[in-house]
């Protein structure tokens, strides 16, 4: 099975490496904890959202473009986490630093553009195909640097704004295995 997201490489995953535990919470929406065994990362997602297998993504609509997701990659210097994780065909609209007890990172808002297609003599404006909020968190150990990318992706900024509370809950609840 392959884990993939726009602008990044592929990673092999195993579907049996996830476990979900309902959280006792009376808030709407209800959340559950998802743990990805191969990374040791756990975080909250809405319990009634559909997982878009084989990737680690969830959506309120199974056929919808709006989704939250997580991806990761082990990188070596001099590769920066932005070059490894942000879509290559994107423009950064805003960025800010974040800190968690277990890692440091940055939160980005990006517009993702359709790849340019050569046309005969016509110049066309690039088309925005998605607006994303990306939270990149780097975890450095003695031997490696793993970058987690928790993100929300939607067709436009308005739809993405509806995903913001879910993404906020996702990255603030994220915890590595002890």
Image (spheres, grey):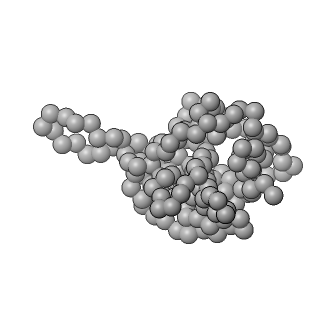
Return the residue found at the far right. Answer: 24
Residue 101 location (% of width, % of height): 72, 68
Q: In which quarter of the image is residue 177?
A: bottom right
Number of numbered tags placed on the structure image? 0
User: From the viewer's perspective, is 161 left or right of 45?
Assistant: left
Residue 33 location (% of width, % of height): 78, 47
Question: Residue at left 60%, top 59%?
Answer: 145
Question: Residue at left 36%, top 41%?
Answer: 114
Residue 73 location (% of width, % of height): 58, 49
Quadrant including the N terminus: top right
Question: Residue at left 45%, top 49%?
Answer: 87
Q: Which of 78 and 93 is in front in this view?
A: 78
Return the residue found at the far left. Answer: 121
User: From the viewer's perspective, is 62 left or right of 19?
Assistant: left
Q: Which of 82 and 107 is in front in this view?
A: 82
Inspect this view and state whether residue 80 appears.
Answer: no
Question: Residue at left 87%, top 49%?
Answer: 24
Q: Is residue 33 above or below residue 62?
A: below
Return the residue found at the far front. Answer: 143
Quadrant including the C terminus: bottom right
Residue 12 location (% of width, % of height): 61, 36
Q: Which of 27 and 135 is in front in this view?
A: 135
Q: In which quarter of the image is residue 176?
A: bottom right
Inspect this view and state whether residue 9 appears.
Answer: yes
User: From the viewer's perspective, is 94 left or right of 144?
Assistant: left
């Amino acid at each position: 099975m392959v884990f993939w997201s726009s602008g990044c490489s592929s990673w092999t995953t195993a579907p049996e490496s996830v476990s979900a535990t309902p959280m006792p919470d009376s808030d709407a929406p209800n959340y559950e904890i998802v743990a990805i065994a191969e990374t040791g990362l756990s975080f909250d997602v809405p319990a009634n959202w559909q997982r878009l297998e084989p990737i680690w993504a969830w959506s309120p609509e199974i056929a919808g473009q709006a989704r939250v997701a997580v991806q990761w990659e082990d990188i070596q210097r001099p590769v920066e986490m932005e070059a490894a994780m942000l879509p290559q065909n994107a423009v950064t609209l805003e960025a800010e630093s974040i800190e968690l007890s277990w890692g440091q990172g940055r939160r980005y808002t990006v517009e993702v553009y359709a790849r340019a297609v050569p046309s005969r003599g016509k110049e066309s404006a690039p088309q925005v195909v998605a607006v994303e909020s990306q939270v990149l968190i780097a975890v450095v150990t003695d031997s490696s640097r793993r970058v987690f990318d928790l993100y929300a992706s939607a067709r436009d900024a308005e739809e993405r704004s509806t995903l913001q509370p879910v993404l906020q809950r996702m990255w603030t609840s994220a915890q590595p295995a002890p």
